[in-house]
Amino acid sequence: MATFRKRPGPGGKSAWQAQIIRRGHEHQYRTFDTKAEAEAWARQIEGEMDRGVFASRSEAEATSLGEALTRYLAEVTPTKKPATAYRERVIGRQLGEHLLARRALASIRGKDVADYMRQRQGDGKGSNTIRLELALLSHLFNVARTAWGMESLSNPVDLVKGQRPKLPPGRDRRLIGDEQIDLLAAATVYGGEIGPLITWAIETAMRRGEIAAMRWEHLDRKARVLLIPETKTGTPRRVPLSTTALAVLDGLPRRLDGRVWGMRPDSISQAFERVCKAAGITGLTFHDLRHEAASRLGERGFSALEVAAITGHKTMQMVKRYTHFRAEDLVGRLG
């Protein structure tokens, strides 16, 4: 049987401590504002003990989300691909600064996650950013429950699946008019690697992270092919290189560390944003160059399967999303 004790609480208010001592289980203690709450908690715990399904909540109640994030980033994140690991470290630091990080894992409910989503939306964060944050939070709770001995935890992110922000429709932004000329001119003034990077992205349809991870040892100059050993989809692929792409490589100095480029993924995006601003170009992201490249491949007559082989997409639906043909460029093929 549980026992209850009335104790002095903060601010002169009284509090009720529930205590459960049962053979074969750790002693369970918890303090509540009212005796009714203490009795309800005790009935729940004793019922679970009677059914043989009780799992101690003590560690989950003593571990804050911030502490769990620190452990997750140290133990779990390093096992992931470099691009994913980098993204998780950025998201983890942001989550660690949120008020939710001060809460015990056991106290975080679906309502708290829903409140967090609404706050992030109010801060102007995009749907995909919020979904990535929730994905990390969900994985953290699953790891804590399955690998860290906190079996009593439930995953609060699962409770708000139907409320998660919907992803916007696929972007169809392409280079128009003289934008490529203006972009490269501004990049030349800006200096550094961003100019060659822009041309390389348009010629190869490679992802930003794949470009940043390129190494000279993966280049087969004779076959005009570049190996990408680690991709977003987990499947290595070989990218055929145009004469323009090879010319870009020929114009680059060799780095001592074996990498082709010296810029990290986030640095590439930041430099691209500054170049676009200098060129007076709006609404264009570095990832849009991948869309542009895939669309140009289709316009040159490559089949959907051939485009997928070059870009690394696993489904035709994704190829369709990333290829946006201009009607004006297809007129000549109609006869």
Image: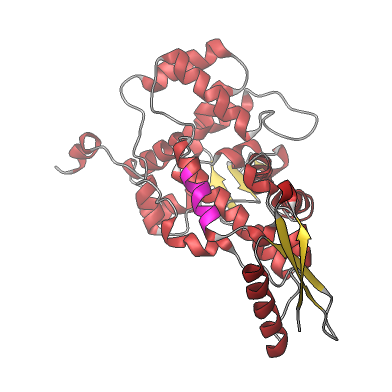
As rendered, which of 327 and 69 lies closer to the eye? 69
Give me the residue at 55% from left, 49% from top.
132
Looking at the rendering, which quadrant does residue 299 occupy? Answer: top left
Q: Position of residue 237 (x, y in %)?
A: 58, 53
Q: Measured from the top left, where is residue 321 in percent x and y?
A: 36, 49
Locate the N terminus by quadrant: bottom right
> In the rendered view, would you say 269 is above or below 128?
above
Give the answer, above or below, for where 93 lies relative to 9: above
Tell me what residue is drawn at x 74 percent, y 69 percent.
57
Taking 191 as reference, is 140 above or below it? below
The foreground one among 87 and 219 is: 87
Q: Position of residue 99 (x, y in %)?
A: 63, 43
Q: Which residues are magenta?
A: 111-118
Query: Does residue 20 sit above or below 236 in this rendering?
Result: below
Instruction: Please indicate whether residue 162 sits to the left or right of residue 74 in the image.
Output: left
Quarter of the rendering occupied by the C terminus: top left
Find the residue positioned furthest to the left: 335
Magenta-colored segment: predominant secondary structure: helix
Whole-percent x and y of residue 144? Answer: 72, 63
Residue displayed at 40% across by 36% down? 292
**187 relative position to 321: left or right:** right
Q: How is the image coloured?
A: secondary structure
